[in-house]
Every structure is written in C-alpha cells, then in structure tokens.
Amino acid sequence: MYNFLVVIMIIIAVLLILAVLVQRSKGGGFSSSVNANQFMGVQKGTDFIEKTTWTLAISLFALCLVVSMLVKNQGPAESRSNMDKVDKEAPAPAPSAQPAPAADPAQTPAPATK
C-alpha cells in the first residue's frame, strides 16, 4: 500500500510540474509556445490549467498526510528499512588472513616421558 501511494505521489508531482510550466506567467511563459489556448479559447484554457494545478497540489498534500499517517501507525518492526534488516542478518566478519603467531618452542613444556 505504501509503495503504491508513493508511486501515485510521484506521478502527481510530475503532472504538477508540467501544469505549472504550462501556465502563462507575466513574461508569456511556456504556454505561449505550446499554444493550448487555441483549441479551448484563451479564458477557458487558463481556467482549466489553474484548476488542474490546484487539484493536483491539494491531492499531493492529502496523499502526503495519508502516507505519513500510515508510516506513523506501523509498529517498530514493520517500519524498519531494508538496510536495518541487512545489517542484522549480515554474517560475522571473516577471521583475519594472518596466521596466529607460533608458540616459542623454548617456553613450551616438554612432553612427559614414562
């Protein structure tokens, strides 16, 4: 559920970026080259883009709140990231490649004879 909502949020964010770029600004904006106003009329095209921008912004805000509530309501075991799981399951480090120092033969006791 969380991953699905995050994908939807990314799609809405990209659409919001495009809607903002298409809007006419004081300097003419990107919409003057797209010329979206020809098929809908100047006023209708501007109103549609503005309503689309507001709708996308409000829906993105609402989805952010929903996702934050989902994450907050998860238990501590469920909200762990994959990196935490990998760190706990990682094998113990391998012993060093250096051989252990040999015992000094002068200090080792001689074997007992019978």
Image: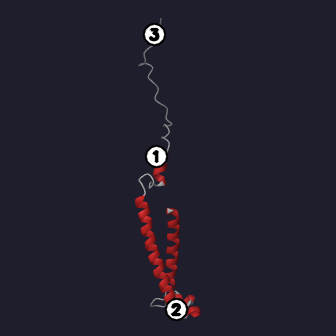
Secondary structure, mark 1, is helix
Quarter of the rendering containing residue 110 = top left
Which kind of residue does numbered mark 3 sit on? Ala
Q: Nearer the viewer, residue 112 or 12?
A: 12
Residue at figure coordinates x 44%, y 77% from the top left: 58
Q: Which mark is residue 52?
A: none
Closer mark to the observer between disc 1 and disc 2: 2
User: Circle 2 is placed at which residue position?
Assistant: 44
Amino acid found under the numbered disc labelled 2: Lys
Front of the two marks 1 and 3 = 1
Q: Which residue is mark 3?
A: 112
The percent position of residue 31, horizontal first and vertical second, equals 53, 88
From mark 1 to mark 3, how far is it between C-alphas?
49 Å
Instruction: From the top left corner, tell me how far across and down residue 14 is, in percent.
Output: 52, 75
98 w.r.t. 49: above or below: above
Task: Find disc 1 in the rendering and name its residue.
Answer: 88
